[in-house]
């Protein structure tokens, strides 16, 4: 199976980007074709054979990745599998691309694989990087209902069937939006602990827009994808969880501002999932109310 890789960059981590590209080049099997998308910035020097696209403005994470997908033809059809990798990450092993080929070839229903993210110094995987509710054991592989945006592999047929990432989200929850649409179309998602991306331990709140975007996009996610009776339940649960985490006053203000924005601004096309998909999510351990 033909494998490509999409990496978006702001151009501010040239050394980390070069190390990541070197780790991709060392993958076993056929060569992985790579495109680096400069998201509103020039692309640093890259090895020969790596394609580059420089966007005049920052389109956000989903917008930049969508440009990378289309670089491989409509919906990425020039390859069978696309890896999406953060530019400050590093593939820990040489067999990751080959394991992806084997996994997708063996399971025709498998649409997305979420890699394990581990700190390069400690080897620790943060709980938030295990895409399921029972996240205590990051070494346990399983079926899941979402995936990690900067460390994953997607069968390009998924994009052809359900579309790409939601451009308008810019940052936060774009993976879950795609995951829900893929699951509704009959695809499955696996979390694989043996496919590892080294990435420094960070807090998502380091981004200035974090609290506003998380709240706004949570509302958009529900409005776009959930059956009408579940929308208030899902958002009510997440409001309660947010309050229980006792964020700072400024963070809470930004969160409620984003929550309001999610209701008052266009969220894109609404395609509510079928109730059998709700049941599938529930059987996989994460009903779409949390």
Image (cartoon, rainbow, N blue to C red):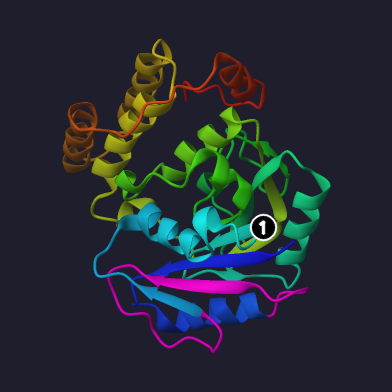
Q: Residue at x 59, y 61 (%)?
A: 83
The answer to whether residue 32 is left or right of residue 248 is: right
Where does residue 106 sit, x and y in percent of width and height?
83, 48
Foreground of the two, 44 or 209:
44
- State whether residue 199 appears in this view: no
SS of the residue under disc 1 = loop
Q: Quadrant of residue 280?
A: top right
Where does residue 195 sit, x and y in percent of width and height?
69, 59
Q: Residue at x 29, y 56 (%)?
A: 207
Q: In this picture, is 231 found above or below 126?
A: above
Q: In this picture, is 82 found above or below 166?
A: below
Foreground of the two, 3 or 9:
3
Q: Quadrant of the N terminus?
A: bottom right
Q: Is residue 92 magenta?
A: no
Q: Residue at x 31, y 29 (%)?
A: 219
Foreground of the two, 178 or 96:
178
Q: In this picture, is 275 found above or below 60?
A: above
Q: Is residue 33 magenta?
A: yes
The answer to whether residue 175 is left or right of residue 207 is: right
- Specify start and end residues of the magenta stretch as a single range: 26-50
- State whether residue 222 appears in this view: yes
């Amino acid at each position: 199976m033909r494998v490509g890789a999409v990496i978006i960059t702001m151009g501010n981590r040239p050394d980390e980007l070069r190390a990541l590209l070197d780790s991709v080049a060392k993958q076993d099997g056929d060569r992985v074709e790579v495109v680096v998308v400069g998201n509103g910035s020039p692309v640093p020097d890259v090895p020969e054979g790596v394609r580059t696209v420089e966007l005049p403005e920052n389109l956000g994470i989903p917008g930049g990745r969508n440009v990378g997908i289309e670089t491989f033809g409509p919906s990425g059809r020039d390859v069978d599998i696309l890896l999406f990798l953060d530019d400050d990450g590093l593939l820990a092993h040489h067999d990751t691309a080959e394991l992806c080929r084997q996994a997708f070839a063996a399971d025709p229903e498998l649409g997305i694989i979420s890699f394990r993210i581990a700190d390069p110094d400690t080897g620790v995987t943060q709980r938030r990087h295990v895409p399921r509710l029972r996240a205590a054991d990051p070494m346990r592989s399983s079926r899941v209902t979402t995936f990690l945006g900067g460390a994953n592999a997607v069968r390009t047929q998924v994009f052809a069937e359900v579309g790409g990432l939601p451009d308008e989200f810019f940052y936060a929850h774009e993976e879950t939006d795609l995951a829900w649409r893929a699951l509704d179309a009959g695809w499955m998602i696996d979390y694989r602990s043996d496919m590892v991306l080294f990435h420094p331990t960070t807090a998502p709140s380091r981004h200035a827009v974090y609290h506003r975007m998380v709240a706004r996009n949570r509302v958009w996610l529900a409005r776009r994808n959930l059956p009408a009776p579940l929308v208030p339940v899902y958002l009510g649960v997440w409001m309660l969880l947010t309050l229980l985490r006792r964020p700072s006053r400024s963070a809470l203000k930004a969160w409620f501002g984003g929550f309001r924005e999610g209701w008052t601004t266009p969220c894109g096309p609404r395609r509510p999932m079928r109730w059998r998909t709700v049941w599938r999510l529930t059987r996989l351990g994460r009903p779409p109310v949390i």
